[in-house]
Image: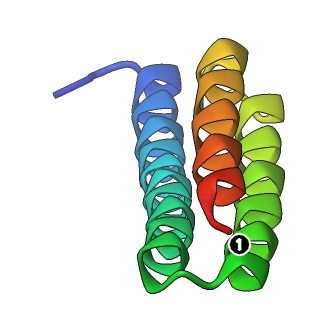
Amino acid sequence: MANIKSQKKRNLTNEKARIRNRAVKSELKTAVKRVDAAVVAGDAELAKQQAVLACRLLDKAASKGIIHANQAANRKSGVMRLANAVQ
């Protein structure tokens, strides 16, 4: 356990950030799963809508530093490829 006051505060801040980051990452996974579900169901319109929403969330997470910008780009590419595959 930390003895220094600034380190105690840092520990609290890190824990809050960890919880927030975990929630955002979970939200990203859910958004991608919604795209997958729409693709499996064969609903092209819903797949497109969910893909756009997932891309927006990925961009937001990347801008806040929760995920790396390149990872966001790769995941957006995969989501859009899935959504465009449905006819």
Residue nearer the viewer, 31 or 18: 31
**Residue displayed at 53% across by 41% down:** 13
**Residue displayed at 74% across by 55% down:** 57
* Callout 1: SS: helix
Residue 66 visible in the displayed image: no
Residue 54 visible in the displayed image: yes
**Residue displayed at 72% across by 19% down:** 69
Please determine whether, in this image, residue 65 is positioned above or below residue 25: above
Task: Please give left or right for residue 56 compared with residue 71 in the image.
Answer: right
Residue nearer the viewer, 42 or 53: 42
Please determine whether, in this image, residue 26 is positioned above or below residue 17: below
Q: Position of residue 39 (x, y in %)?
A: 52, 71
Residue nearer the viewer, 85 or 73: 85
User: How many dots with numbers?
Assistant: 1
Residue nearer the viewer, 66 or 56: 56
Q: How is the image coloured?
A: rainbow
Task: Please give left or right for residue 1 compared with residue 63 in the image.
Answer: left
Q: Outermost residue, left direction?
A: 1
Q: Position of residue 87 (x, y in %)?
A: 68, 68
**Residue displayed at 40% across by 34% down:** 11
Please determine whether, in this image, residue 19 is positioned above or below residue 14: below
Residue bearing mark 1: 50
Q: Quadrant of the N terminus?
A: top left
Q: Position of residue 15 (x, y in %)?
A: 40, 45
Q: Position of residue 18 (x, y in %)?
A: 43, 44
Indicate the quadrant where residue 62 lies.
top right
Indicate the quadrant where residue 63 lies.
top right
Please determine whether, in this image, residue 10 is positioned above or below residue 46: above
Disc 1 crowd, CA 10 A, few/some/many (<14, 14-19, 20+): many
Amino acid type indicated by mark 1: Gln
Q: Outermost residue, front direction?
A: 87
